[in-house]
Amino acid sequence: MLKGAKLYCTEPRVSILQAMIKADRPLARNQMVKLLGKNHFDKVTIYRTLECFLDAGLVHKAFLQKRAWFFELAHHCSKIQCHPHFTCTKCGSTECLIGVSVPMIKGLKKGIVIYRQQTRLEGLCQKCNSVTN
Amino acid sequence: MLKGAKLYCTEPRVSILQAMIKADRPLARNQMVKLLGKNHFDKVTIYRTLECFLDAGLVHKAFLQKRAWFFELAHHCSKIQCHPHFTCTKCGSTECLIGVSVPMIKGLKKGIVIYRQQTRLEGLCQKCNSVTN
DNA sequence: ACAGATTTGCAACTAAGTTGCAAATCTTTT
DNA sequence: AAAAGATTTGCAACTTAGTTGCAAATCTGT
């Protein structure tokens, strides 16, 4: 993958990419650090790695939560629309809603060009909802 | 308005509310500071004021941009869905798309309860698009 | 105008992310 | 396999949004 994107194939990049593939959900830097365990890289390295993945199109910025960006592999995303993301307001977990279709918005003023549409949902996840009380 | 929400009616609160009414678009703290001009309040005061407006339902957190929250009056929002917001990637301006309907997402797994749906658009605004080159 | 409740502003702090730069690591070439 | 040149890493220091504790100031109802 790294070679395909013409990127230097270094230890941090390999490990970070593996972690993201394994997790298969949006991750913020501090979550990656946890997943990487003893493979400890400087935060600057992680940010720069993610940025070069971004430039290479391997990765997307999925959303911002508590002022931290969550990154995810770009493989489920079209150019104009990523899948929607659902966050549970109780437990804080976030799910990717893959396979749920979201119609593009229509009826905008003329002259505007849309590059990207993004949908976010908030509510209670299955788990938290069943424990509701 | 403040009295209606049973809030202490203080100078910062009145000024901030006025600024938001006048602007009638989502504002981040530093934009409010500009609008307030010589009416200078501590940033802590502004954040706390906005939070109490939030609790009172006068205001919404519209979106996060460059890691700063933008707040707007809640009067155009329904409980479950705020109007969509459009941000121009060139000039950075953001518009509220009021009157554009966004269907609620369907086809979710059972057991999930949705509290809120949010749509964000990115692209070129009328101005920037016509100058495109 | 007073007493009690609430809010304000300051200082100090947290956390995410960025920048500059020398040292370390990769890749390509020999 | 080793050297040369290009790229990446890690450290220290910084920026920015937002938060916390607390004493002083401001509001409200009486």
Image (cartoon, coloured by chain):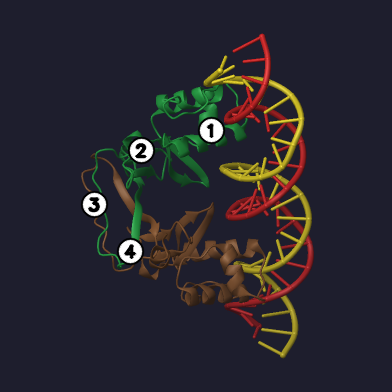
Chain colours: A brown, B green, C red, D yellow
Which residue lies at the image location 24% right of the left edge and 38% below the top edge?
B99
Q: Badges 3 and 2: C-beta atoms under 8 Å apart?
A: no
Q: Nearer the viewer, mark 3 or mark 1?
A: 1
Same chain under badges 2 and 1? The reply is yes
- Could you tell me which chain the residue with mark 4 belongs to? A
Q: Measured along the vertical axis of the image, is residue A105 above or below residue A22? A: above
Disc 1: which residue = B49
**Left or right of residue C23, residue A22 in this image:** left
Which residue lies at the image location 57% right of the left edge and 63% below the top edge?
A29
Residue A72 in sight in this render = yes
First reached walking from the N terminus: tag 3 or tag 1: 1
Quadrant of residue A103 within the rendered picture: bottom left
CA separation in Å, label 3 and label 1: 33 Å
Q: Position of residue A27 (x, y in %)?
A: 51, 65
Q: Nearer the viewer, mark 2 or mark 1?
A: 1
Disc 3: which residue = B103
Q: Position of residue C26 (x, y in %)?
A: 62, 77
CA separation in Å, label 2 and label 4: 24 Å
CA separation in Å, label 3 and label 2: 19 Å
Asked which secondary structure carries label 2, the reply is strand
Q: Position of residue A130 (x, y in %)?
A: 39, 66
Disc 2: which residue = B95
Q: Measured along the vertical axis of the image, is residue B130 above or below residue B20? A: below
Q: Badge 1: few (under 14), some or many (20 or more) residues near its Cα, within 10 Å? A: some
Q: Badge 4: few (under 14), some or many (20 or more) residues near its Cα, within 10 Å? A: few
Give the amino acid at mark 3: Pro
First reached walking from the N terminus: tag 3 or tag 2: 2
Residue A118 in sight in this render = no
Residue A78 — which label? Answer: 4
Q: Nearer the viewer, mark 4 or mark 1?
A: 1
Q: Badges 2 and 1: C-beta atoms under 8 Å apart?
A: no
